[in-house]
Amino acid sequence: MAALQIVNVEKRYKALQALGGVSLSIEPGEFFGLLGPNGAGKTTLISIIAGLNRADAGHVAIHGYDVVRDYREARRRLGVVPQELVFDPFFTVRETLRMQSGYFGLKNNDKWIDEVMENLDLAGKADTNMRALSGGMKRRVLVAQALVHKPPVIVLDEPTAGVDVELRQTLWKFITRLNREGHTIVLTTHYLEEAQALCNRIAMLKAGRVVALDSTSALLKRISGSQLVLRLAKGGLPEALKPLVSHPDELVAGRKYTLRVNEYIEVEPILATLREAGAVIEDMHLQQADLEDVFIQIMEGEK
């Protein structure tokens, strides 16, 4: 049975088609990435999964429980970390987590609450009022709230947006541990290096539709070979080399260019062409294509 089953989900807001028939099946224990540009439909889909919004068509089930018909059972199996910092300013961190436990009928949950706070570096703030916390600390509490009932499926919607490096490292260490213990993780993020490092499988959305769905390794293989990154101190990129540019916007910005190369032997002819054109190289290095390159290629290829 799938941990999260999404079947032909559609959602429209007047003239806007937010989701146009999204189907995904996420297996228990997966670390799954849900990527896409702003407005792709990721947050709308998460709202439907969480039962905060209703699909116009299709259905969603968490461990076999429909999020509409079996809302209580589905919600018990789901923890969601939202993008927005939403909190009650009248309670301490510990009180907030105890109340969240109460929503799920959990009593005597302090041992797990203490463990969650310890792993998210919140133990020192346990008795601090929520309104006195920094933005980063409030973000940690949101993560703790999502985990307080030990849900088998955890959805993280931009969990590290605008937070410091320390929180990112602390969060991923704990989430990776939960994933190893069998929890299913669904992550949306604009930090594609996070998705590449953490996710076993990735779906990419554009304009409410799935435009790519594969293992991370298979997606990375879509761009073969290496990339030659050049920064020019003088001159522009010769016309003969422009078809090799990976990111077309670089042709507008100028100076820095990322060129596709399949073999190292292709580098010398490129350098010769630059010399003949009178271009002077300020910096140069070879790198392997990453998930950002794949993402850009797929998004530009889907009109």
Image (spheres, rainbow, N blue to C red):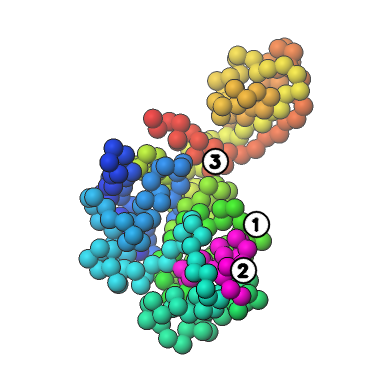
| Residue at 50% in and 66% down | 87
Q: Earlier in the sequence, mark 2 or mark 3?
A: 2
* Of the image marks 2 and 1, the number of the one nearer the N terminus: 2
Q: Is residue 169 left or right of residue 91?
A: right
Depth check, front residue: 235 or 81: 81
The answer for how far apart the CA atoms under marks 3 and 1 are is 21 Å
Q: Secondary structure at mark 1?
A: loop
Q: Is residue 142 magenta?
A: yes
Report crowding for label 3: few under 14, some 14 to 19, many 20 or more residues within 10 A (C-alpha): some
- Magenta part of the protein: which range? 128-147
Q: Amino acid at mark 3?
A: Glu
Q: Position of residue 48 (x, y in %)?
A: 33, 56
- Give the residue number, with chain letter if any, for mark 1: 164
> What's the residue at 60%, 77% (across, down)?
126
The answer to whether the residues at label 2 and label 3 have Cβ atoms under 8 Å apart is: no
Mark seen at residue 292: 3
Residue matched to label 2: 132
Are there few (<14), some (14-19), or many (20+) residues within 10 Å of tag 2? few
Q: Main secondary structure of the magenta part?
A: helix
